[in-house]
Image (cartoon, grey):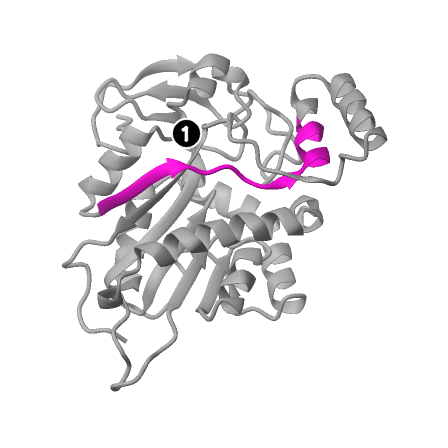
Amino acid sequence: MTRCAACGAAGLVPHLKVAGDAGPDGLIPTTDRFGTALADIVRCPVCGHRQTDPMPADAVLESAYADAASQDYVAEEAGQRETARRALERIEAQLTPVAIPPDNGGPRHRTLLDLGCWVGFLLSEAVERGWDAAGVEPSAFASAYARDELGLDVRTGDLFATDLPLHHYDAIVMGDVIEHLPRPGAALDRMAELLRPGGIAWMALPDAGSVVARGLRARWWSVIPTHVQFFTRGSLRVLLERHGWTVLEIRSSPKAFSVRYYLERVAGYSPRLARLLVRGARAAGLAERMWAPDFHDRMAVIARAPEDSGSEES
């Protein structure tokens, strides 16, 4: 029996018929195939969470993400770094001095783990701000880029199998990751084991309860083959609290990309219109300008790990 990944309730009901062939490029981080998922989407009548049913097996996704490769985000480095700086500012604002105790009587670097760090732009920004930062990324392409091009400490692997020090990190980042995981609750439990007492997690993800998502339904640009969970603000809070986390803030979280990048995504609805818009933006000299439109359909949450999640710090 399928149960809600957020609250655990049974009796999920049909929500959207969107199952389709993901195609050869379906499981990469960017896509313009809006309205297609690996299975139809069902809704929990208790907490409002949406998820694909049936849920794909872990092994299927692990293999696909290990092979994933895309230059799209590399080309958008400036916007990705600006988005990362905004996230780090929110994380630093929530980290209290209690959460960063001194090391042997003296100051120590804050420790950050980025799970699903892709090519590592957030990690790079964190290092520049003084963090002792490491990352985990299943994609061989992306993790190699982070190591070889940016000189970052990034391990190729996944959250559950990668050997990581327990109770070591002050903050964990998961940007656009939890919506890809068949077992998001297990991921939260694992993250709690990795955080120091008082540590926090920052997650960014699509907001399926937003006005845009509810209006566009199957044509919403976050209904894509890589996504298997569709959280609302309420269902995400339910999941976190069910696993002992304390929600500190939930807010809208737009991403910065070039105007050209956003206009190219219109191809998910009309390739011809996308070409015309990009051509017009180039003619006006706007195509490469950074843009962070807030459609209020992407959220960021900061939550504190359960107090009893760990033993001694490492």
Q: Residue at x 31, y 26 (%)?
A: 49
Above or below: residue 139 compared with residue 229? below
Q: In this figure, which residue is indicated by the disc labeled 1?
A: 207
Report the magenta residues as a range: 246-265
Above or below: residue 207 compared with residue 41? below
Q: Residue at x 26, y 56 (%)?
A: 192
What percent of the width, then of the height, locates residue 106? 30, 84
Instruction: Name the residue type under label 1.
Output: Asp
Q: Can you name the residue that lies furthest to the right here?
A: 283
Task: Work out whether residue 223 or residue 157 is closer to the camera in this orientation and state it.
Answer: 223
What percent of the width, then of the height, locates residue 88? 44, 55
As for residue 268 lying within the magenta part, the answer is no
Split into 4 quadrants, where in the image is the N terminus? top left
Q: Residue at x 66, y 18 (%)?
A: 269
The reply, left or right, for residue 146 in relation to residue 197 is right
Q: Is residue 76 visible?
A: yes
Task: Work out whether residue 230 or residue 90 is closer to the camera in this orientation and state it.
Answer: 90
Q: Is residue 162 visible?
A: no
Q: Residue at x 58, y 57 (%)?
A: 121
What percent of the width, then of the height, locates residue 212? 47, 19
Q: Can you name the residue that lies furthest to the left here?
A: 308
Q: Dot 1: what SS?
A: loop
The reply, left or right, for residue 111 in relation to residue 136 is left
What percent of the width, then of the height, locates residue 259? 69, 34
As for residue 252 lying within the magenta part, the answer is yes
Above or below: residue 303 compared with residue 122? above
Above or below: residue 20 compared with residue 293? above
